[in-house]
Image: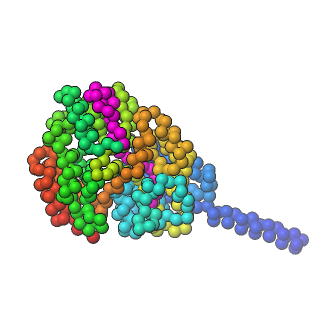
């Protein structure tokens, strides 16, 4: 009898230990994001369902917050020590969070399935503090019908801004209400065009502003004189409240450098033939790159491995990437060509390979802690130049002086 009792107790002990070990293996992490709030919460849930099926020991509690409220809430949560285990950041905020030690280095996972160029955007001082959860970029979209009417050859990957200007002038000559190009004269456009002309907003180590450099003066003249001199771009009065997309969809605009997120809207609303190409360069090529980083809270400890596994899945799993492409929810920054082929053959525009060719020339936003203030100052003086109130040289000199006065760099 005693032997039987000992056997039963041994079995119960083994079962209890096994159950305890199994419970110990299970982990729950929290993930907060903003990008699915635009109608892709169901897609994100499908991604999680796939992940959980492959990793039943990891439960992810997902929270989605609208973009307008997201960063205010995250700032409060980080400061109060209540931030989630992992979360999403836009590229503009990533550098500030990483510099303040808010993020944990991502290690122990296979990142070979992620595009190395996109991955490098979230690597600081040799450490991977974020993964590109998705990306989008800017290409040159053009109206093939207007090019045909003007007798101009379509853009190629070798185009410079001189080539684009000649085409814009030929298209403008088709009629008073037809314009060759529409590119916003704003901070986001300025830092990219600056790079195309060999300039930048800072010196190499970001210790001084260089916005009034000769290269930048040439870049801004290229932007502004389309409106004030050659008139291949409509001025504010002629725009009449119409945005650049509206102009393009009206069939009265030859070219527009804009984001790949325009494809579905243009495919549905343009009753003319259109396509895309890598944006023209000048001294060199430079194209916009927008990406949302997915990161791990620096205070996350025991859940770090699970968080890294979840984020790597979101960024590079082929099944998750296929769901993202199917939903038209930006693009996965992956290397799996089989998955990407479904995007390349998804209809208009025909030259979708230009989207990935543009990654070879990406330029990242010149982010600093006082990024919003810098953008406001730049936009104010660019607007003055675009209106013709001041010369480009005077606008950039005033911009340089105000930046130096109000923002202290390293």
Where residue 226 sits: x, y (%)? 19, 41
Residue 196 horizontal/vertical position (percent) = 29, 51
Q: What residue is drawn where x is 51% and y is 43%?
A: 340
Q: How many marks?
A: 0
Outermost residue to the right: 1
Horizontal side, residue 145 vs residue 50: left or right: left
Image quadrant for the C terminus? Answer: bottom left
Q: Along the line of sight, which residue is nearer the eye, 326 or 302?
A: 326
Quadrant that contains the N terminus: bottom right
- The part of the image, by quadrant, that contains residue 38 is top left
Considering every residue shown, the one lying at the far bottom of the view is 2
Q: What residue is rendered at 27% in x and 40% in y?
A: 163
Q: Is residue 257 above or below residue 25?
A: above
Q: Position of residue 164 (x, y in %)?
A: 27, 40
Q: Tell me what residue is drawn at x 51 percent, y 50 percent.
A: 335
Span highlighted in magenta in the image: 130-157
On whether residue 31 falls in the magenta region, the answer is: no
Q: Position of residue 181 (x, y in %)?
A: 25, 37
Determine the residue positioned at 37% across, 68% down: 100
Query: Residue 391: in sight, yes or no?
Result: yes
Depicted 11 relative to depicted 222: above or below: below
* 53 up-or-down from 258: above or below: below
Residue 140: in magenta span: yes
- The answer to whether residue 320 shows anywhere in this view is no
Q: Is residue 239 left or right of residue 152?
A: left
1, 11: nearer the viewer: 11
Q: Which quadrant holds residue 199?
A: bottom left
Question: Which of the pair 73/197 is nearer the observer?
Answer: 197
Q: How is the image coloured?
A: rainbow
* Quarter location, residue 165: top left
């Amino acid at each position: 009898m005693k032997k039987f009792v000992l056997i039963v107790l041994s079995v119960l002990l083994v079962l209890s230990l096994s159950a305890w070990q199994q419970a110990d293996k299970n982990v729950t992490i929290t993930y907060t994001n903003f990008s699915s709030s635009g109608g892709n919460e169901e897609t994100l849930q499908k991604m999680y369902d796939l992940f959980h099926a492959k990793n039943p020991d990891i439960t992810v509690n997902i929270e989605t917050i609208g973009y307008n409220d997201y960063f205010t809430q995250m700032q409060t949560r980080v400061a109060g020590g209540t931030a989630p285990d992992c979360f999403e950041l836009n590229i503009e905020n990533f550098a500030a969070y990483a510099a303040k030690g808010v993020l944990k280095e991502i290690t122990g996972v296979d990142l070979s399935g992620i595009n190395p160029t996109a991955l490098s955007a979230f690597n600081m001082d040799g450490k991977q503090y974020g993964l590109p959860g998705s990306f989008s970029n800017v290409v040159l979209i053009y109206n093939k019908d207007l090019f045909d009417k003007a007798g101009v050859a379509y853009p190629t990957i070798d185009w410079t801004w001189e080539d684009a200007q000649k085409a814009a002038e030929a298209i403008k000559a088709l009629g008073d209400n037809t314009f060759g190009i529409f590119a916003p004269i704003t901070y986001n456009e300025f830092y990219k065009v600056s790079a195309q002309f060999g300039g930048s907003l800072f010196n190499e180590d970001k210790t001084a502003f260089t916005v009034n450099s000769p290269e930048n003066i040439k870049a801004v003249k290229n932007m502004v004189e389309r409106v004030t001199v050659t008139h291949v771009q409509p001025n504010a009065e002629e725009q009449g409240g119409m945005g650049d997309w509206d102009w393009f969809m009206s069939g009265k605009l030859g070219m527009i450098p804009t984001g790949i997120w325009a494809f579905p809207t243009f495919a549905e609303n343009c009753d003319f033939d259109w396509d895309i190409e890598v944006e023209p360069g000048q001294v060199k090529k430079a194209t916009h790159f927008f990406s949302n980083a997915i990161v791990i809270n620096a205070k996350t400890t025991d859940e770090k491995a699970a968080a890294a596994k979840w984020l790597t899945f979101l960024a590079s799993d082929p099944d998750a990437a296929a769901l993202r492409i199917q939903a038209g929810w930006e693009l996965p920054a992956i290397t799996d060509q089989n998955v990407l082929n479904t995007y390349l053959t998804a209809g208009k525009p025909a030259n979708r390979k230009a989207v990935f060719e543009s990654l070879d020339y990406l330029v990242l936003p010149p982010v600093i802690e006082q990024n919003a203030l810098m953008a406001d100052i730049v936009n104010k003086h660019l607007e003055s130049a675009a209106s013709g109130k001041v010369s480009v040289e005077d606008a950039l000199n005033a911009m340089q002086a105000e930046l130096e006065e109000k923002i202290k760099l390293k």
